[in-house]
Image: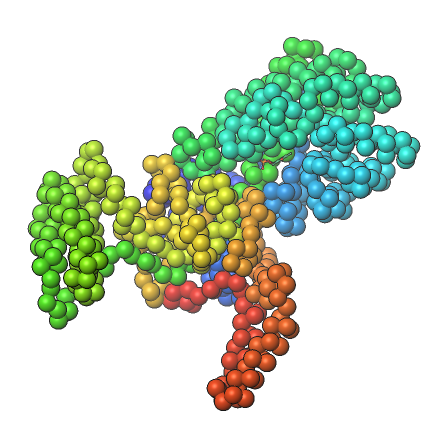
Amino acid sequence: QALYAMESWADGFYAVNRQGHVSVCPIEGQTLHIDVMKVIRAARAEGASLPMLIRFQDVISSRVRRLNLKFQDAIRECGYEGTYRSIYPIKVNQLHEVVAEILEAGQEFNIGLECGSKAELLAALPLVGDETLLLCNGVKDATMLNLMLNAQQLGQQVVPIIEKYSEFDQLMSLIDARQIKPRMGVRVKLNTRGSGRWFESGGASSKFGLTIPELVKLVRTLENREITGQLELLHFHLGSQLSDIQVLRSAVKEITQIYADLVLRGLQIRYLDVGGGLGVNYGADYNNPDCSINYGLREYANVVVYTVKEVCDERQVPMPDLLSESGRALTAHHSMLVVPVLGVHRPDSPPATDLPLELHAVVLRMKAVYNNVLLTEKGGILLECYHDAQEIRRETEQLARLGYLSVENMAQSDRFYWSICREVLHKLAAAELNPVPAEQLELEKQLTDLYLGDFSVFHSIIDHWAIGQVFPVMPLHRLHEKPERRGQVVDLTCDSDGKISQYVSSAGTVDCLPLHDFRQDEPYYLGVFLVGAYQEILGDAHNLFGRVDEVHIYARAEEKEGFWIEELLKGISVKEMLSQVQYFPNDLDRRMSEFIRRQINAGCIKPTEGTRILNNYTRHLEDTTYCDICAGDPL
Ligand code: PLP
């Protein structure tokens, strides 16, 4: 638990139970814990294949409640005279059930939605009815603006947020043609720049938002048209995963001053929208702003509420209703990916004892070093042995290149060398030398095992590959056993980037993970956590690995195991995946059967064998795109 710095990222939702399994405590304030291994077993029994995404729907509700209650607390404590609503940006996770869960949990808090494209708008319009606020960001063409005006005519609370001045011009032409008054908001480019990886979303040179001169021009146009009452919202967005709370404070001050100016000028702006950016702790590395944030939900809410109040009091203007567009903070925790380990590649193997071999002198020297290492515990001697082994290895390679060393001798020398390395590392680590010798660090790197996981980094955690986002990874069981190995998790893709190269640990971000010895006849499952925001929709199909199976879990104390599977969604099949790249099953089948018939006619195989091979090919088109085999399966 401590090894994987669980405290820093679990946010009270994940723990380790008495059986040494990861457990989930999805409902705030309840002691009900769900054993993840039992979820996997139940899902397998219902036909789910691996890898598998598990969604704990109650975690979404807990996060929605937590965020809204923190704002309510702040509002009450400081006597704020407006209200707060959170607005969920569906781009973060558009899955219908996720959005539905957020809307249901947020009903008592008046939660709203945000969309950023035509498809998202069309998905959201029927969900919001006539009470839920729907904010529309992103680039908007005439079609989208017309859809929004239609929704406003229907009485829906749809507010286009002007991001570019040309959008405003277009909106004005449309309302002239339709003779209606639109509701609208404006995104403002602030001088404050974000902090963390997405800092470019904010600041004067950001892609979206009106500059202050453009805002003034827009306001003048509204004044000339005598429709200033139509501008009801001011918005900014500094970028996702804000690492530093002071940046938010500065931005909120800046936007509230603009708000106060406009209100004093006679505008009736109702909402102040502080955008997204509320971050999540992915680990304990406070030096890495991509991984950690320096605030919690309470501080976030306090900074927004108190700062707006302070400026409004100073400028003697009414306090606006507050909105925030938090997505990551609502969804990241609720889903985890279960990755079965298929096998392990180790750089070393023990020296063979049974080779009927005349060993070359150089190999005998390597063997002597190995024997010396076995006899000593002293740091200095261990390092000397390691240096000797390195030198002998160089000689071995030279001899092999010149043809003076047989492959069997090379193999034996290699085995001795890696055994020396492992033994030296083991003993140096036990000696706890301070400072840690450079050789020890070098050996730790070299002796990392590669754990082959049945998953694709590019599909399931693309931000790890694309932007180096660190996700918590740990075994889901055997957590009472000391993990004796150090591993890196590699995926199924034929791509050397297809690996998890950074891990969360209590010592910060590290490049390998403490793992257990892999046993061929037993399943070994790893969990990748906090994957509920952005990953699912951004994931790609490298090597045609596609959507994985997923199960939606609700925690219920009255159920035998404390949960029930509300839904099992099958991942994409090979057939469906191939159709997306224009290989159609009928055509593939026809080509395959024609080829097999030719081979039968040529006498290459018997007709019965040909039929068997064809059926086998056709059947596997229905498979998942992953291996879906697991050591020791079934559990
Ligand atoms: N609002 C806007 C305009 C965004 O562009 C984004 C995403 O970056 C969000 C909200 C969601 O941000 P987060 O997931 O950090 O809360």
Residue nearer the viewer, 73 or 442: 442
Is 542 rendered above or below residue 635? above
Confirm whether residue 258 shows in the render: yes
Residue 466 screen position, x and y as percent: 50, 43
The residue at the point 65 percent across, 20 percent down is: 255
Is 20 rendered above or below residue 85? below
Residue 595 screen position, x and y as percent: 56, 80
Number of marks drawn:
0
Query: Which of the 4 image quarters holds residue 158?
Result: top right
Residue 548 screen position, x and y as percent: 54, 58
Q: Is residue 148 left or right of residue 321?
A: right
Residue lying furthest front: 402
The residue at the point 60 percent across, 35 percent down is: 326
Residue nearer the viewer, 38 or 269: 269
Image quadrant in which the N terminus is located: top left
Image quadrant in which the C terminus is located: bottom left
Q: Is residue 68 left or right of residue 1?
A: right
Confirm whether residue 334 shows in the render: no
The residue at the point 31 percent across, 53 percent down is: 449
Judged from the image, the quadrant occupied by ligand 1 is top right
Is 491 rendered above or below residue 125? below
